Image (tube, grey):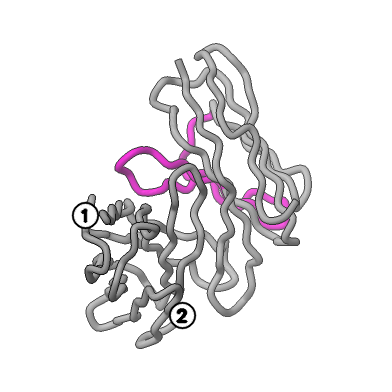
Amino acid sequence: ETGVTQTPRHLVMGMTNKKSLKCEQHLGHNAMYWYKQSAKKPLELMFVYSLEERVENNSVPSRFSPECPNSSHLFLHLHTLQPEDSALYLCASSQVRNSGANVLTFGAGSRLTVL
Amino acid sequence: GDSVTQMEGPVTLSEEAFLTINCTYTATGYPSLFWYVQYPGEGLQLLLKATKADDKGSNKGFEATYRKETTSFHLEKGSVQVSDSAVYFCALSDRPGNTGKLIFGQGTTLQVKP
């Protein structure tokens, strides 16, 4: 496996379900990100983890709960979601340095539908 | 706060036409600028980047020049192909050494017809 892998690729869940999205990076990067992609809206940054510590949480509702157990894995735990949470959830990783451009590498995304 | 604005799409062109997708930004400091591309059913891929004023990023026939005076980073290609049909995102970076996050525009869909 290379790059950034996200599972599952597609998920359908009811509003009372609990599910998790998984992201794994094989690039040796030190930072990981969750973005939400909704139709006709800019990508919304949800969470940033640097060296396994959450460094940014952009006012995301508590029904989304991230977890970063190590530098290669990132989870997004989902519970009691709303239909408006249906979107493509993108994971990315990068090697954050003190100089130069920071390039994010994205996974293919997990398409979530909340019924 | 920092933000990115792209032209509304979709942009529909015939094969071999000239492409311009406009992107302007608002930022404190001097961010790096990026264009990412998203093909159907896939995640975002880096297309090109520029790290300082007057830098030109280029890749696969696409080009964009970092214009500090107009706070712009317009994407251009001289002759588009059907395979270029995708969604294009302009983005700017957090300052080096910080979280490394990118702030994206809303994306512009390009449709190229044979």
Question: In terms of depth relative to the viewer, which is nearer, B106 or A100?
Answer: B106
Q: x and y percent of residue A88 in the render?
A: 47, 37
- Residue B78 relative to residue A26: left or right: left
Instruction: Decide which of B37, A80 is in the foreground and name it.
Output: B37
Q: Identify the residue at the far front of this view.
A: B114
Location of residue B70 with respect to B20 vertically, above or below: below
- Give the extent of the magenta segment: A34-62
- SS type, badge 2: loop
Q: Nearer the viewer, residue A1 or B90?
A: A1
Q: Chain of mark 2?
A: B
**Quarter of the image with the C terminus of chain A in it:** top left
| Residue to which mark 1 is pinned | B12
Circle 2 sits on which residue? B51
Q: Is residue B80 magenta?
A: no
Which badge, 1 or 2, comes first in the chain's sequence? 1
Judge from the rendering whether residue A72 lies leftward or rightward of residue B8; answer left or right.
right
Residue at image coords 44%, 28%: A85
Point out residue B24 in the picture as x, y percentages from the top left corner.
Answer: 26, 68
Residue A5: percent from the left, percent from the top?
A: 66, 46
Q: Which three-letter amino acid code belongs to the residue tagged 1? A: Thr
Residue nearest the observer in this picture, B112 or A95: B112
* Eye-nearest disc, 1 or 2: 1
Quarter of the figure with residue B96: bottom right
- Marks 1 and 2 sit apart, C-alpha to C-alpha, by 30 Å
Residue A47 percent across, percent down from the top left: 55, 46
Q: Secondary structure at mark 1?
A: strand
Q: Residue at the spot x=50%, y=14% of the render? A: A15
